[in-house]
Amino acid sequence: MAYFLGVDTGGTYTDAVILDEAQDKVIGAAKSLTTRADLAIGVGGAVDAALAQSGIAAGDVALVSLSTTLATNALVEGQGGRVALVFVGFDPDDLGRGGLTEALKGDPVITLSGGHNHAGQEAAPLDLDTALPQIMALGDQVMGFAVASRFATRNPAHEIALRTAIRAATGRPVTCSHELSVDLNGPKRALTAVLNARLIGMIDRLISACERHLASIGITAPLMVVRGDGALISAAMVRERPIETILSGPAASIVGARWLTGAQNALVSDIGGTTTDVALLKDGLPEIDPMGARVGGFRTMVEAVAMRTTGLGGDSEVHLITEGLSGGLRLGPRRLIPVSLLASTQAGMVHSALDRALATDTAGEFDGRFVIPTGGEAAATAGLTAREAGLLARITAPMPMAACLNSRLEVAALTSLIARGLVMIAGVTPSDASHVLGRQTGWDTQAAQKAVTLLARRRNGAGERFASAAEPLAQSIIDQLTQQTVDCLLEAAFAEDPAFAGHDGACLARHVLARAGLSQHKGVVQTALRLGVPVIGLGASAPSYYGAVGQALGCDMILPQHAGVANAIGAVVGQISQRASAIVTSPSEGRYTAHLAEGLQNFNSQDTALAAVEAALTAEASGRAQAAGAADLRISVTRDIREASVEGRAMFVEARISVTASGRPRVAHAPNPT
């Protein structure tokens, strides 16, 4: 009998489950608040409680697997450490392609001559003499480097040389674009490398926190992490390639939903504190996004489930829309610490600030808002302006936002500190609204009541208050969450239905006819619209919110037992999978070039070249799968050969070979008999 431990660290909660493999049953499940300053506290609270509930000893755990939404949340919220991009052989205009400039957010770029052509031949020598002084000057100003060279997927020599030089000069982590994808499109690979470099520190802290706690309680089982495609990968590999964990939590939720319900066809919607993640389960399996994972507005080259991630959750920021006479509400995409949650640990400070604001007749811009230092590592403060550094120095503990700002000029500096992950904001969220309405009771309801009352006192374009009291505004916030969730699900449904291929799902979901159909409009024109598949609602708050969502969409809403810990369940029921890919080209008739990681290899025969590449990739994929902890490997090979017809004769153009090695994780030992 083997026992598996699954852990999921989200923006608000960390979940843990104990799974009895023999009985295929959850025997322990628990939640603990995610503790950003020291993630080990939240991980430990959830793990210890789940173990206590299961009744098994820590030493009986044979496998630990981790999923997380931290990387996804960071990209959705535009957060992460400062990095430098080394851009080799590209034109200046290439920085504006594929969202690369937006992803860099003003971080430094070193442009160099070098790179290769489409055949893998050197286009220009690598200019290391120019690079090294700039690299050394930036070494203590950034958390890591991303390196992207032109046609590096055809020949990675320049990226490898730069990686060696940067590590020797600075000791900082380096991400090479060719390690993340074998596809062309250099700017998109550069974007993926930048995002990877930005996430390294965050994911390393999470894995280290998990490892520390497991060791402290005597769990020696191997630690796995869920990738964005739902497969498992070793913790060591994830430290180098954290970008693969974007959509890790959502991918685990899909696997968990299938395990919990046995459903074959459904939309799976997982609401967390920061995001809502929607995917289609078709014939029991999720689809893989052929274009690469899209998160936070960025289209990456990471293979992941076809998931739509929206900045909408129980802890989403509540925005008051003051344009127009009546105004309105909008939620997200940024996550805030709910005021009710902050007050549960900082009651005196929070209630004092709220009471002072309520004692005046004039609504202040920052009423009910607080700033909280996250205790980020020292490297994250590199490159701060004097104003930003001065502001950060004053935020030594949670405090009212108005108390930390000396002038309006510092609002922009505070925004920059938030983007760096050095400061978090507390304010009104749907979780606070749920406390006001009695739907949730875990935190400080009185603080929620006061904060929502302050928000209700704000004025719309007509000069009237947004609401007469806390309760009606709280209900409006919940109604807005329902509407935005309906939009997310309907958008995903239109995008997945072949009948609407080529149309913008977002526009269709918000079209006047779609709105009329959902409301069953009956006039001169009669309309009706409903989802044709059930929705599986996951997340701790799904039972509170998703009943109304199902009614609005006219569909069955499945809320399974353990829906609140589905991600943690999915983390331990997946498989390890590693894929290696390479390209074979034909620069001239009768000559075939294999573009492998170790360099170019030339062959005189197409069959010989393909066989040699397949053998090399099989060894690479198998080695990586075994290093990731897989046992009893299964190997699958795909060949995509492109040919052109010339004067009626088939001519080889290019072939892409992919080898996948997969298997269940090795367990640590045979557990003690019970």
Image (tube, helix red, strand yellow):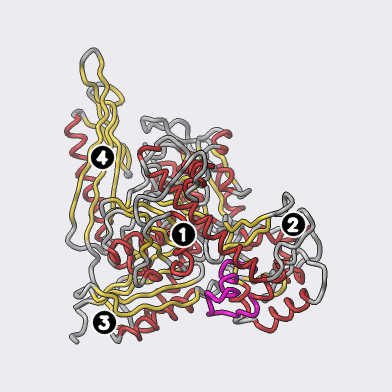
| Mark 1 element type | helix
The three-letter amino acid code for the residue at tag 3 is Asp
In the picture, the disc for residue 657 is 4
Upstream in the sequence, badge 3 or badge 1? Answer: 3
Residue most extreme to the top: 647
Circle number at residue 460: 2
- Mark 4: which secondary structure? strand
Magenta range? 426-448
According to the picture, the residue beneath numbered tag 1 turns out to be 549
Question: Disc 3 marks which residue?
Answer: 60
Tell me which label, 2 or 4, sits earlier in the chain: 2
Give the mark nearest the N terminus, 4 or 3. Answer: 3
Q: CA gap, disc 2 to disc 1?
A: 28 Å
Distance of label 2 from label 4 (alpha carbons): 60 Å
Q: Nearer the viewer, mark 3 or mark 1?
A: 1
What separation in Å lies between label 4 and label 1 (alpha carbons)? 44 Å
Query: Does the magenta portion include 425?
Result: no
Q: Is residue 327 left or right of residue 224?
A: right
Give the spatial CA distance, label 4 vs label 3.
Answer: 41 Å
